[in-house]
Image (tube, rainbow, N blue to C red):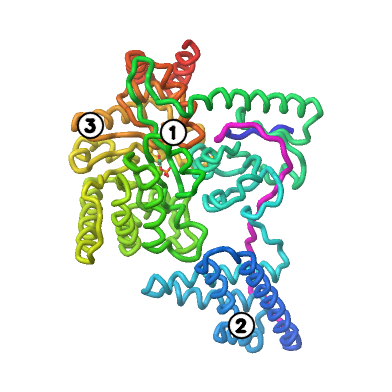
Amino acid sequence: MVIQGKAVSKGISIGKVFQYVPFKPIVTEHMIQKAEVEESICSYEAVRDEARREFCAIIEKMANEEDDKKKIFSAHIEILDDDEINETIYAHIRDDLYSAEYAIHSAYETFIGILSRGKDPLIRERALDLQDIKMRLLRLWFKAPAVNLSNLEEPVVVVANDLFPSDTATMRREHVLAILTEIGGETSHTAILAKSFGIPAILGLTDVTQLLKPGETVIVDAVEGSVISDPTEEDLIKFKKRMEEEKLRKMETEKFLAMEPYTSDGVRIDIALNIGSAEAHELSFAEVTDGVGLFRTEFLYMRRCTMPSEDEQYEAYKKVLETYGDKPVIIRTLDIGGDKQLECMELPKEENPFLGLRALRLCFDMMPVFKTQLRALYRASVHGTLWIMFPMVGSIGDIRFAKQIVEEVKHELQIEGHEYSETVKVGIMIEIPSIAIMADIAASEVDFASIGTNDLCQYLTAVDRLNPKVAKYYQSYHPAMFRLIGNVVNAFQSQKKPVGICGELGGESLATAVLIGLGLRKLSMNSSSIASVKKTVSEINIRKAERMAQTVLGLSTAAQVESFLKSEMNEK
Ligand code: PEP
Ligand code: MG
């Protein structure tokens, strides 16, 4: 059987299926008889003991880690043994005749509700700890296995309905041969992370979780976007050969990794890196890139029970800034919402999260969180060349308000005697059409811009970037995209303000010539694209790139643009 989807991170893999089904308890209002009370209490206590044993085992495993992390789990044990919570559970069982699982659920929900309404963010964060403990107790109650991608024991093909960016960010990468999901599109964050880790991924595979069995061997062809289940011996031989060829081709392209990116007629193009952490594997590309074009800081906030403190953020930013020295590091302020959720903070449920309280808007709504990040950024600014960037800017008003907060933070730091660099640049992402259209005015208000084509395409074409049902309408090669990009580049360049691109399109070698032809001289991308884009840069000259851009601006459809670019690239 062949299942077809969208290849979002290219490559070929062969391996065993691992079905990733995170536990979601269904607790109904279930009552017991009076005679069952004692037995229910005993069962609850047994589950609680089991949870305590699990926490102790985690703490033991963390013997070599910082005390801070261990403290989280000791605090969980304290909550588990909290008298008030336990008394509430006992009362629900004894007096209300709730079943044990319903009593656990109800008692924890009551306390979660109280804490989440707290004014102090620290108190609100405790609600998440309770949520975590409730899920653990219910998982043990239902005897469901603990599934987690961070402790995969052997190499597998991960199959899931959907993955949260936090799942992808924390999974044990060396054991993930490929990712297959039912949900998600080309620029979903799962796709972006898979690409940056070099893991083949196909998303938008209808019913893949039903069609594939755990443990069965599959061939993942993330070039064509197909998954072959139950492969024949012939299939296996054919794909093993293709894997070898792919490896060789990659090795050939990798030769361009360390090359200085000049076009064939000698124009320098800056190639910057998109990162999601300050981890060594990401920073190992510092030598071969001209800076960080996008640090997605939201990953610092994910998969944890508390918000990262100012000091913790400062250390992460400092590390990146020091690594890059004189080269600019663009750090984007928290871009949460849409498909990126936080465990440490419940975000409001919305009908249209991509059109809702997201990114900068959310930061405006959570001033302490925003200011903490800005403080950490400015404090770290003395360690390198910091450019701060705001995501999801929709209006000049957004820019002015964000800059006002920046001034307040600088003033506070000054009063407290903290040092910061006076040369920090403040810029914006161009990812909402309204600001792209206003680029001439925006350019006079900021120091730089970077075009976020992932969201720009979503908002320009009115297509949910995650919904596989409308994937064919999500057209990054839509001529309207190039027209708008051209306008933005002209607006910024005429005011001598730096402008780059950091959406996925910036890392696609098919688009490299037209982007350069439109005037872009800085392209930022995932590490896996650097070599192939540098190779393409070395093969084009500016005059030809400009001619190609002019042609593209006159074409009518995305299909025409793609086929024109493919034929031009092949001709070369
Ligand atoms: C973009 O929208 O193009 C972008 C780079 O931001 P993100 O993918 O993180 O939304
Ligand atoms: Mg974006």
Task: Judge whether 38 appears above or below 147 on screen.
Answer: below
Position of residue 40 in the picture relative to residue 194 (left or right):
right
Label 3 amino acid? Ala
Q: Give the foreground label among 2 and 1.
A: 1
Q: Which mark is residue 491?
A: 3
**Magenta: main secondary structure:** loop
**In front of the other: 30 or 491:** 491
Amino acid type indicated by mark 2: Ile
Three-letter amino acid code at the position of disc 1: Val
Is residue 567 visible in the rendered image? The answer is yes
Based on the picture, tell me whether residue 24 belongs to the magenta stretch: yes
Residue at 44% across, 16% down: 564
Q: Residue at 38% across / 15% down in the picture?
A: 264
Magenta range is 8-32
Q: Position of residue 77 (x, y in %)?
A: 59, 76
Q: Nearer the viewer, mark 2 or mark 3?
A: 3
Report, in whole angstroms, how far the alpha carbon at label 3 lies from the one at label 1: 29 Å
Asked if residue 389 shows in the view, the reply is: no
Q: Position of residue 360 (x, y in %)?
A: 33, 52
Q: Residues within 10 Å of mark 3 (few under 14, many from 20)?
A: many
Q: Position of residue 383 (x, y in %)?
A: 32, 50
* Residue, far top: 571
Please tell me the numbered disc located at residue 89: 2
* Disc number for residue 288: 1
